[in-house]
Image (tube, rainbow, N blue to C red):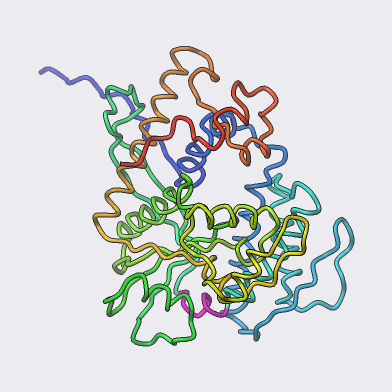
Amino acid sequence: MVLSKKRGNELIPQYSLTGDLLSYLRCGLQYRYHNGSSLPPSRPVQLWFGEFIHGVMEAAYRIWSTTNPAFPWPSNPTPYRQAPPKGRSAHDIGVIGDVVEGTLMAQGKSARSRDTRDNAYVRAQKAVNELGPHLFPLIASAEERVIGTRTIPNSSANASRSQLYELHGIIDVVTDVQLSGATTKNVIKQAIQDSCPGLSGNYEVIVDYKGSRRPATSEPYWQQGEWQVQTYGWLRTRQANSLPVAAGVLLYVNELSPVSSDLVSLRREVSNNKTDVIPANGTPDSYALNAWRTGNAIPNFSLAFRLARAIRVIPIDPTSQATATNNFDKVVASIEQCVAQEAVAGAINPNWAPCGDEETCAACDFRHFCPSPYPHKKGHVVGAPSAP
């Protein structure tokens, strides 16, 4: 009797949608140092800000679902490096922020500066009090973990560690929306209706918070945001007891409280027709944006305009899901190829491409020895697969 040879163990690499794929698209070399070398950034400003907003919104929803305190909620943040104020209520956004901030600090994540921390609390307060009344009533399940397995394209040619990879993520909010019961005052439901006409019955909407401004339609991050929610939709359909996923909603929290640099970018995008939400001509918002100059106080834009800038609805269907997941398959293949090339060459820098992006480089601890820091190839994501 001839016994067959035992097959060797196959390592199926695991990838997080945000922690791996989007991080690699932002900067391949930074991703390698953080993830491949397990070197945590000493000042992870982008990471801290996003996780702080996520944490505050998650905690605020759980408080609202339990005790339903009326909006607006108070916000009395603890002064920078001082003792917490006394007499604050449990739903005070300052109290919620203290808990989230302490949790992140235990993980080695802290705000880069006092200004970063102050801006985070201002935007968290805006998100809870301005988005919360519309979002919280729609939530059916928060922080849902999703997972799925996919094939790596051309895995043999790329010398990948496996023919398959595991993709996972956390859907920050899954909403079960029935349009027949929608109130016309709910701006999120109205935005879904406007973007997905003809929907009826029950379906799910995936919502993700972004601790950033609404990107220009010409930026890579605009399309990557769409790929993200489309892929989340695909992953959600692989879970038991899920309803059809009709749309994804990205909530750009920074739009609720813009700063000077945001308005500089917005004015440029409006002039170049590179943004999809602009104030209507002749409105106070349009006049305020046109009249604003760097160094002046930030205009008091209307809530309707700021919410329109903050809410982005992306319709989801099988075709759009296939396009997005196929593009992320290419990202995984690119990462696996970099891993294989580094293993052969025994060197990191020649095999992982830096980005040369101003915002990313400014917050990167590795910029001092990066072979291609900003301003080289400004604004170009090197090594990222192109859109179809």
- The reply, left or right, for residue 276 in relation to residue 241 is right
Q: Give coordinates of residue 326: x percent, y percent.
A: 30, 43
Q: Give coordinates of residue 75: x percent, y percent.
A: 75, 73
Of the pair 177 and 62, the residue shown nearer to us: 177
- The reply, left or right, for residue 280 in relation to residue 161 is right
Q: Is residue 138 magenta?
A: yes
At 61% from the left edge and 39% from the top edge, which residue is drawn? Answer: 360
Does residue 387 lie above or below 29 as drawn?
below
Of the pair 148 and 80, the residue shown nearer to us: 80
Image quadrant in which the N terminus is located? top left
Q: Is residue 268 magenta?
A: no
Specify the principal SS of the magenta part. helix
At 35% from the left edge and 41% from the top edge, which residue is drawn? Answer: 387
Does residue 152 lie above or below 243 as drawn?
above
Q: Which residues are magenta?
A: 133-139
Seen as rendered, the residue at the extreme right is 82
Of the pair 282 and 240, the residue shown nearer to us: 282
Of the pair 306 and 355, the residue shown nearer to us: 306
Image quadrant in which the C terminus is located? top left
Does residue 365 lie above or below 4 as drawn?
below
At 35% from the left edge and 32% from the top edge, which residue is drawn? Answer: 333
Q: Give coordinates of residue 368: x percent, y percent.
A: 70, 25
Instruction: Determine the image quadrant of residue 44.
Output: top right
Instruction: Determine the image quadrant of residue 340.
Output: top left
At 36% from the left edge and 70% from the top edge, which residue is drawn? Answer: 195
- The reply, left or right, for residue 166 in relation to residue 105 is left
- The reply, left or right, for residue 334 in relation to residue 208 is left
Instruction: Determine the image quadrant of residue 287.
Output: bottom right
